[in-house]
Image (cartoon, helix red, strand yellow):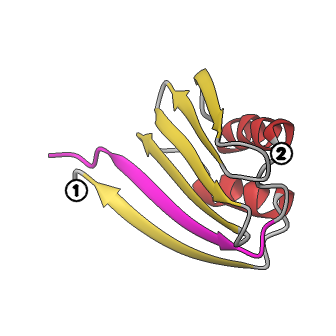
Amino acid sequence: MNQAGTHLIADLYGCRGLDDMALIEDTLRAAVRAIGATLIGLHLHPFGEGQGITGVAMLAESHMTIHSWPETGYAAIDIFVCGQGHDLDRGIALIADALGADREVLTRIQRGA
């Protein structure tokens, strides 16, 4: 079986703006462009004033997600894309920069390998 794709999981710490819907939306859209993917749809769900946001960007190539905890400054990011030629590290770097992360832990998984 050929590799199905790459799944990059990022734990971002020391983040700000994690309850800012406009920031999260703009950041996800920019990250999709940065990795060279095709956005099919984007849905964000806020959990209330000062609480986190869950967002899903549906991609022609798979998906990008964020789950945020503003009370601890933590964001969980997943990017999974099928095929080759996508710069997932560029997408994570863009998100980490936009959220002001002071630390990131990355896990890369080759799916279907």
Q: Are marks 2 and 1 in contact (CB under 8 Å)?
A: no
Q: Is residue 73 magenta?
A: no
Res 17 label:
none
Residue 92 left/right relative to 62: right
Kind of residue indicated by mark 1: Ala
Quick one: 100 or 92, which is closer to the camera?
Answer: 100
Res 113 label:
1
**Residue 55 lies in quadrant:** top right
Residue at left 41%, top 53%? 6
Residue at left 55%, top 42%? 64
Relative vertical location of residue 3 with respect to residue 15 in this rendering, above or below: above
Q: Main secondary structure of the magenta part?
A: strand
State the image coordinates of residue 14 (x, y, percent, origin top left). Answer: 77, 76
Quick one: 108 or 76, which is closer to the camera?
Answer: 76
| Numbered range of the magenta stretch | 1-15
> Where's the C terminus, which quadrant?
bottom left
State the image coordinates of residue 108 (x, y, percent, origin top left). Answer: 44, 66
Residue 78 left/right relative to 113: right
Residue 80 left/right relative to 105: left
Quick one: 71 or 37, which is closer to the camera?
Answer: 71
Residue at left 78%, top 68%? 15
State the image coordinates of residue 96 (x, y, percent, origin top left). Answer: 75, 63
Classify mark 2: residues with Cα within 10 Å, few (<14), some (14-19) or many (20+): some
Res 20 label:
2
Kind of residue indicated by mark 2: Asp
